[in-house]
Amino acid sequence: MKKLTTLAKKKLVIGALEDIKAHDIQAIDVSKVTSIFDWIVVASADSARQTKALSRHLRDPLKDAGAHIIRTEDEGGGDWVLVSAG
């Protein structure tokens, strides 16, 4: 399987967030600030339930495209969720 580029991951993430009605989506280029990752994508949801749904809806297409999900944090609470896709 072909490795997903950073920009392709960003596009996939934004598309998945838009699909499930996230709002205030921001993609922030941090490649000049840190060598750990290139982009941070931040989005808002209207409820804890939607936050959890956004996280799930994001992980599946990333996995299907060959991205490795490194970690998901605080999905249980639903106030915020961090999905690290490498």
Image: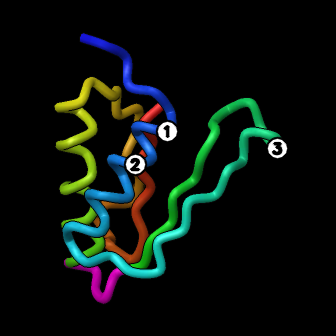
Q: Secondary structure at mark 2?
A: helix
- Name the amino acid type tagged 2: Lys
Q: Residue furthest bottom?
A: 46
* Circle 1 SS class: helix
Residue 29: % across, % down: 67, 50
- Residue 7 placement (x, y as % from top left): 49, 38
Q: Is residue 29 above or below residue 8?
A: below
Mark 2 closeness class: few <14, some 14–19, many ≥20 residues within 10 Å: few
Q: Nearer the viewer, mark 2 or mark 3?
A: 2
Residue 47 on the magenta span: yes
Dominant SS in magenta: loop
**Residue at position x 34%, y 27% in the image:** 68
Viewer-side residue, 30 vs 2: 2
> Which numbered circle lies on residue 81?
none
* Badge number at residue 7: 1
The residue under label 2 is 11
Q: Secondary structure at mark 3?
A: loop
Which region shows up in magenta? 45-49
Tag 2–tag 1 contact (CB < 8 Å):
yes
